Image (cartoon, coloured by chain):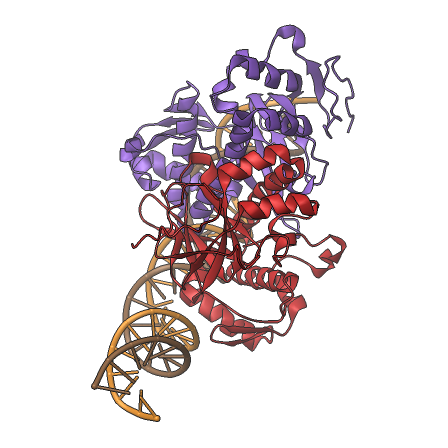
Chain colours: A red, B purple, C brown, D orange
Amino acid sequence: MTRSNALPAAAVSSHQPGLENNTVISLRDLKAQCNICGMRGLCLPVGLSSSDLQKISSLADTHVKLKKGETLYRTGTPFTALYAVRLGSLKTTVLAEDGREQVAGYHMLGELIGLDGIGSGTHGCHAIALEDTEICVVPFEQLETLARELPTLQHNLHQVLANEIIRDHSVMLLLGSMRAEERLAAFLVNLSDRYCRRGYSSTEFVLRMTREEIGSYLGLKLETVSRLFSRFQEEGLIQVQGRAIKIINAEALRNLSGQNNNAATVPPKEESA
Amino acid sequence: MTRSNALPAAAVSSHQPGLENNTVISLRDLKAQCNICGMRGLCLPVGLSSSDLQKISSLADTHVKLKKGETLYRTGTPFTALYAVRLGSLKTTVLAEDGREQVAGYHMLGELIGLDGIGSGTHGCHAIALEDTEICVVPFEQLETLARELPTLQHNLHQVLANEIIRDHSVMLLLGSMRAEERLAAFLVNLSDRYCRRGYSSTEFVLRMTREEIGSYLGLKLETVSRLFSRFQEEGLIQVQGRAIKIINAEALRNLSGQNNNAATVPPKEESA
DNA sequence: CGACTAGTTGAGGCCAGTCAATGTTGGTGG
DNA sequence: CCACCAACATTGACTGGCCTCAACTAGTCG
């Protein structure tokens, strides 16, 4: 639990969030501001002038590096900032009172996490890096202040929050009314879409999480997940080699998942898992 | 689909949302502003001066009455406003692409719904009255404008959004890792708490929804719900008479639901379902 | 009164969980 | 470099909780 307080010399006056085991670095010198950040269109929906982006990027010039397995924040720690994933990926997990833990979401680059802390002032879940990960820290108080000046930013923030609600609803639908094979298919389709949107292959990717973590997210046991991977392979839907996945029959997967791919009529929208 | 355009004479200039089969009435004359509305502390977390409240209440002086079964908004209809429940209750339901429908939440007086529409500009679920219901319409554009002037209101709005995310997470936990009896117990405990917070009995209340709707929300079939009600009664946990519920052994229910009632150490927070 | 909806209860089946044995992979230190 | 270990993954046999199908009851409304 060594807590790094090596704050950058930057003008960010926000209180340092409860980071653990992390290295805090300043990327000011690297000129890694939001307007040259590749994630710009994902993090904050487009529609901001470059001068506005300048203001935002000056907000978020604190960065954090996490090694695989390290924690960005924990349930109950004070909420002070939102976090944008610049590189890598994380899982968020929620805890039941009785100790049961469940993966609430997987987050990859360009996604904003920590939103659930706004309500109570403390984080409502754990965020743990699934691989070496780089995070952009956005002090929330300052974001709120800036949002009062920039209506577009304000609206974007509201959209990000509302999209998280939409995402949660689709997970509820998955958990509440889909069978195991449908859940796993939906999971793969979702990952595929998100990789695709980021310019990666939609058909070949490497899972960053264990079978158990997948199961936790989908409300299944790890053995069930493993069996389904094997079955999907037998049926020619995918090829599995450990965590390496190759999608062979995307259409069949999409049908299984309940999302007919004539959904091309619907504009693809950012939806994380 | 008769659409009432009987807008009140009030100064609300917002475009009328896609209401269906509803009567729109002005309560200006009834002086039913937020600051005398009994729901003030629930709707918008406290911390606003009375003059600020005045501004907000002038925003929300359009009211809607729904009869049982009527729709407040539908999936896909344009989002223009948030809705506060003044009286009665509603369910919201989400639709899968393949037509499957699932109850996403039950909302009673003092709760704010329609939040999910912010993201895409169209509603992401249906909202249907479970009984005769009165709704307070809060035009969202104007709310955003006002939020830029009133930091407290701005923050409250963020909190309401974030609390919805928290709530969804607890539903995900329920659906993903609890057994049928635990789910139903959690449902009853949740209702009990919410009635209690509103000054109603926490031990005797009347369900506003069918067994099927309960099942849909909990990821169970109606027969399972019915059987569990019977079993809970046999075991002396509750008394059931159709939709009338009397909780006999609240502690046992709470234990079943995974929320030990020593959770009195944790400040009870508003959490809808 | 008949038609309809909501709810209860029973019998049987199936999907996913549980338990257990074995195989595979990746990191570490000698 | 390889042996070793721990974590991760696969597969099989069996179990059980919830679903499905079905019959019946109770209350409601025209």
* Residue ID at (53%, 62%): A184
Tell me where residue A152 appears, x and y as whole percent.
67, 39
- Asked if residue B2 lies left or right of residue B165, the reply is right
- State the count of labels: 0
Q: Quadrant of residue C24?
A: bottom left
Q: Residue at x 63, y 68 (%)?
A: A202
Q: Does residue B269 appear left or right of residue A260 in this picture?
A: left
Residue A116: % across, % down: 47, 42
Question: Residue C23 at x, y = what percent?
Answer: 38, 83
Name the quadrant containing residue A178: bottom right
Q: Quadrant of the N terminus of chain B?
A: top right
Residue B83 visible:
no
Residue lying at 70% horizontally and 60% vertically, measured from the top left? A261
In the picture shown, does residue A72 fall above or below B27?
below
| Front residue of A255 and A122 | A122
State whether residue B241 appears in this view: yes
Q: Is residue B84 left or right of residue B123?
A: left
Tell me residue A223's x, y (percent): 41, 67
Up/down of B43 relative to A184, above or below = above
Side (left or right) of A260 relative to B129: right
